[in-house]
Structure formats: C-alpha cells, structure tokens
Image (cartoon, helix red, strand yellow):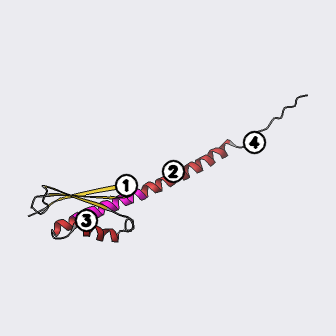
Amino acid sequence: MKTSLIVDDKGSALLEVVAFAFVGFGLVLTLGFQMLETERKVLELQSISRNAMRAHLLDPDSDIFEEVSRLQSKSRLLAEGNIAISVTCIPATCNNPGTLVWVELMAEDLHAKAFGVKSG
C-alpha cells in the first residue's frame, strides 16, 4: 500500500520577501559606501592637482612635484598611497609666458587633471 506524505508549507511569503529585501538592501548599501569612498578619493586627487597647479602658477619657481608631495602628505585619504605625476607643456618649454601646462595625477586606478597658462 502506497502512502503519500503531504507536507504543508506553513512559511510566510511575506517573511521571505522581507528577508530577501533586507539582504538586498544590505548589498546595495555596501556597494553605495564603496562608491562613495571612491568618489571621495577622486575629489581629493582632483583637489591636489588643482592646488599644485595653482601654487606653481602663482610662484613659477616652485616645483610641481614637491607641491604634489606636500599636499599628499596633508591628505587624509591619499597620504599612504603612491601618486604618479605627469607634467606636459605646450609648447615644450614650460618657462615661456603663455605656455599651457597640464598636470595629470594617477593613484589607485584614479585619474585627475589640472591645467593652467603661464603668465608673463
């Protein structure tokens, strides 16, 4: 004789939806915090590039590399990491008035650029 066992599902669909929403919200919140931290680092890197360029344009004898290093040491987010610096001048000599100077900073797969025109 065959017997069949009927299992009653007494769980609540509402409980499952709430649990899934709780886990999903936690994942979205974690991702949001990670994106916020990355955005903070990008803004900090942009600030360093702009301020280094500004200092160099106000005092042409100052070194952009030393200024970036000084600003990085004061940064809370980027003080520990390495920042790669690239300086480009158009035309090639950076000391002439009217020269366009580009500074590009790269750190942790993040990029920031700033430019300025030398006055004479």
Mark 3, Cα crowd under 10 Å, few <14 / some 14-19 / many 20+, is some
Q: CA distance from mark 4 to mark 2?
A: 30 Å
Residue that numbered label 3 is attached to: 51
Q: CA distance from mark 1 to mark 3?
A: 21 Å
Q: Residue 32: give x, y in percent of width and height.
A: 47, 53
Q: Indicate the secondary structure of the residue bearing disc 4.
A: loop
Q: Which residues are magenta?
A: 37-53
Q: Residue at x 43, y 59 (%)?
A: 37
Q: CA distance from mark 1 to mark 2?
A: 23 Å
- Give the foreground label among 1 and 4: 1
Q: Are marks 4 and 3 in contact (CB under 8 Å)?
A: no
Mark 2, Cα crowd under 10 Å, few <14 / some 14-19 / many 20+, is few
Q: Are marks 2 and 3 in contact (CB under 8 Å)?
A: no
- Give the foreground label among 4 and 3: 3
Residue type indicated by callout 1: Asp
Mark before the other along the chain sequence, 1 or 4: 4
Q: Which mark is residue 10?
A: 4
Residue that numbered label 1 is attached to: 109
Residue type indicated by callout 3: Asn
Quarter of the view holding residue 83: bottom left
Residue type indicated by callout 4: Lys
Mark 4, Cα crowd under 10 Å, few <14 / some 14-19 / many 20+, is few
Relative depth, front residue between 85 and 120: 85
Q: Are marks 1 and 3 in contact (CB under 8 Å)?
A: no
Residue that numbered label 2 is attached to: 28
